[in-house]
């Protein structure tokens, strides 16, 4: 991969994220002057359309994936909630810096605990909070560093040995890499933002391999920021508006199925950014539809056999989700569109680019030393 291609991609990435930051600042200003409702929606509409277009300006799948997830999905949904003064961006006390972080990054504020402490204790906590946050942020960073080493090892392994092993094993390892990469990227962002915002944030992932059920997996452990956002933007409105007509039972079923189908739609949009073509949505839609139905059936069965329910081992749930995801979604995506090789080639190209850049800076430093320090010529 040519150096010019990487430099062009870096310029595109800077342009895309500059547009995102400017758009977030625009939305912050709009909320101060435009009331909630229809008028605010139409003032946000250009930004929502822009957030759907911007990932198309990128070519590297390792940049397309996080940008499309952070912006086209999460940021767009947060802004839709803000239209009606809901969601994490609706807090009027947010500064423009806090607003931009919450809008553009995959973070979600934790619900505050009930205020039982005295004002003196609160003042002491506020006084030392930044130092305490920095101290406690180091522990999860070490945890994510360990996962990062595992991720790098898997990437190196796949780069050199993917042609030796069966495709099933390679795709399974790719899915594990995707999970670790999502966990590390979102986790590190959350730790840094927690220090900057000086408040507690929801963890990105909550040990999904410890899940006790599908409901526990999807509701409390897997990609929690996306789950909370979908609950606020899809599940709760569907349940609220269908409750009077259908009753609690059918309203909850409709809300669960609707939430999983919207998730399928957003995944299809992300796959379009990756592949550049509109694919038949059968596999992805079927995956989320099946898991939505299984979650409903599981909840009904647990109520009927309450007291006799045996906790399912977490790795079985995690393995089942990965297996169905590979079977229905990833098989065609990875093999037909060659995303594995594209991703690995990008990693190799970035490493080579960083090496060349380092050598260029070394030569510049050497030439400067020869000019200002005559003895440097003998180095």
Image (cartoon, rainbow, N blue to C red):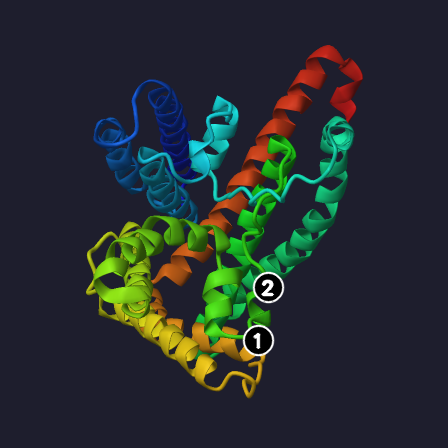
Residue 114 numbered mark, or none:
none
Q: Residue at x 68, y 57 (%)?
A: 146
Front residue of 13 and 216:
216
- Name which of mark 1 and mark 2 comes first in the sequence: 2
Local crowd size for mark 1, using a 10 Å CA cut-off: few (<14), some (14–19), many (≥20):
some
Can see residue 54? yes
The x and y percentages for residue 278 are 19, 57
The x and y percentages for residue 137 are 70, 43
- The residue that label 1 is drawn on is 314
Front residue of 114 and 324:
114
- Is disc 1 placed on a helix, strand or loop? helix
Tell me: residue 47, above or below residue 248: above
Tell me: residue 375, above or below residue 342: above
Give yes or no for contact between labels 1 and 2 (Cβ–Cβ under 8 Å): yes
Local crowd size for mark 2, using a 10 Å CA cut-off: few (<14), some (14–19), many (≥20):
some
The x and y percentages for residue 212 are 55, 74
Tell me: residue 86, above or below residue 296: above
- Is disc 2 placed on a helix, strand or loop? loop
Can see residue 336? no
- The residue that label 2 is drawn on is 207
Number of numbered discs: 2
Rendered-image quadrant of the C terminus:
top right
Front residue of 67 and 136:
136
The x and y percentages for residue 169 are 48, 77
**Quadrant of the image occupied by residue 358:** top right
Q: Residue at x 42, y 33 (%)?
A: 90
The span from disc 1 to disc 2 (Cα, nearest Å) is 9 Å
């Amino acid at each position: 991969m040519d150096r010019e291609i990487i430099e062009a991609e870096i310029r595109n990435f800077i342009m895309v994220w500059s547009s995102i930051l400017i758009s977030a600042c625009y939305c912050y200003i709009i909320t101060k002057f435009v009331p909630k409702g229809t008028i605010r929606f139409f003032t946000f509409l250009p930004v929502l359309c822009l957030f759907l277009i911007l990932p198309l300006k990128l070519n590297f799948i390792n940049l397309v994936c996080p940008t499309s997830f952070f912006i086209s999905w999460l940021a767009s949904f947060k802004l839709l909630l803000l239209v009606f003064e809901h969601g994490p961006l609706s807090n009027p006390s947010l500064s423009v810096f806090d607003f931009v972080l919450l809008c553009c990054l995959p973070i979600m504020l934790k619900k505050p605990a009930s205020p039982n402490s005295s004002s003196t204790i609160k003042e002491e906590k506020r006084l030392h909070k930044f130092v305490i946050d920095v101290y406690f942020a180091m522990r999860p960073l070490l945890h994510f560093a360990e996962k990062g080493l595992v991720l790098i090892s898997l990437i190196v392994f796949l780069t050199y040995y993917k042609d030796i092993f069966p495709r099933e094993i390679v795709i399974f390892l790719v899915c594990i890499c995707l999970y670790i990469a999502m966990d590390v990227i979102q986790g590190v962002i959350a730790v840094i933002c927690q220090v900057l915002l000086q408040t507690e944030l929801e963890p990105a992932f909550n040990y999904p391999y410890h899940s006790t059920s599908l409901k526990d997996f999807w509701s409390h452990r897997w990609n929690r920021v996306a789950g909370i956002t979908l609950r606020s933007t899809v599940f709760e409105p569907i349940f609220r508006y269908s409750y009077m007509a259908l009753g609690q039972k059918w309203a909850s079923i409709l809300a669960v199925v609707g939430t999983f189908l919207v998730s399928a739609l957003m995944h299809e949009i992300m796959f379009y950014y990756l592949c550049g073509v509109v694919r038949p949505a059968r596999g992805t839609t079927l995956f989320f539809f099946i898991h939505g139905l299984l979650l409903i059936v599981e909840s009904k069965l647990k109520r009927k056999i309450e007291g006799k329910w045996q906790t399912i081992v977490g790795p079985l749930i995690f393995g089942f989700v990965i297996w169905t995801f590979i079977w229905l979604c990833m098989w065609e995506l990875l093999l037909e569109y060659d995303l594995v090789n594209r991703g690995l080639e990008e990693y190799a190209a970035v490493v080579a680019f960083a090496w060349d850049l380092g050598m260029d800076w070394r030569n510049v430093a050497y030439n400067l030393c020869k000019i200002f320090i005559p003895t440097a010529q003998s180095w």
